[in-house]
Image (cartoon, rainbow, N blue to C red):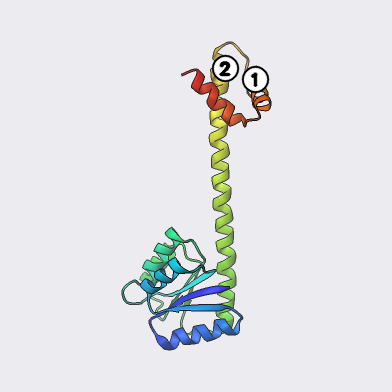
Amino acid sequence: MHILIADDEPIIRMGLRAMLQEMGHTVTAANDGREALQQLRRHTFDLVILDVKMPYTDGLQAAQTISRTTPLPILLLTAFSEADLIERAANLPIHGYLVKPIRPDQLAAAMAIAVRRFADTQALQQQTAELSQKLAARQLIDQAKQQLMASGLSEEEAYRTIQQRARHSRQSMEQVAQEILKQTR
């Protein structure tokens, strides 16, 4: 994977880079959240690891921006396990939270889970969008069916009429429904 790490402590940054490279990953490092966001505009990454407390743009702010603009799996790192930080992080679309110092096995496990949770979330969002589109199409077809029924057709006849028009015109039932509703307005 191509991984972006952001930590204001050079020793931590170098240690993370070494761990990740040893695991076979390509790593780009940033000194703070602002620099991380700049890197994201220039390059494509598979995972982002952000320190929570950094100057300029902290990890929480950067995670929020990343999730809005360039959704990616995000892991947060911190030397602090304060309840308020954990609460703020829990309200963000992040995929893991690690407390320093980090061992390679912990990092590898957290990365695997983060990537999987992100993929699951993306799949659910896609599914939700598709279902919303289908529901909107169904509602439109029902409205067109009601319009046809107002002209004396039974519900079954109205549905069949929409189906047949769609088949003959090689359009979707949704497109035919839109045409029917336009004609009656």
At x 56% / y 50%, what residue is drawn? 126
Looking at the image, is 118 positioned above or below residue 75? above
Residue located beneath label 1 in the image? 161
Quadrant for the N terminus, please: bottom right
In the picture, residue 50 is in which quadrant? bottom left
Look at the image and tell me whether residue 102 can be seen. no
At x 57% / y 63%, what residue is drawn? 117
For disc 1, the neighbor class at 10 Å (few under 14, some 14 to 19, many from 20) is some
- Residue at disc 2, secondary structure: helix
Amino acid on which the number 2 mark rests in the picture: Leu
How far from the left and from the top, in percent, is residue 98? 48, 76
How far from the left and from the top, in percent, is residue 121? 55, 57
Could you say which is closer to the camera, residue 50 or residue 167?
167
How far from the left and from the top, in percent, is residue 69? 43, 59
Amino acid on which the number 1 mark rests in the picture: Thr
157 lies left or right of 7: right
Residue located beneath label 2 in the image? 148
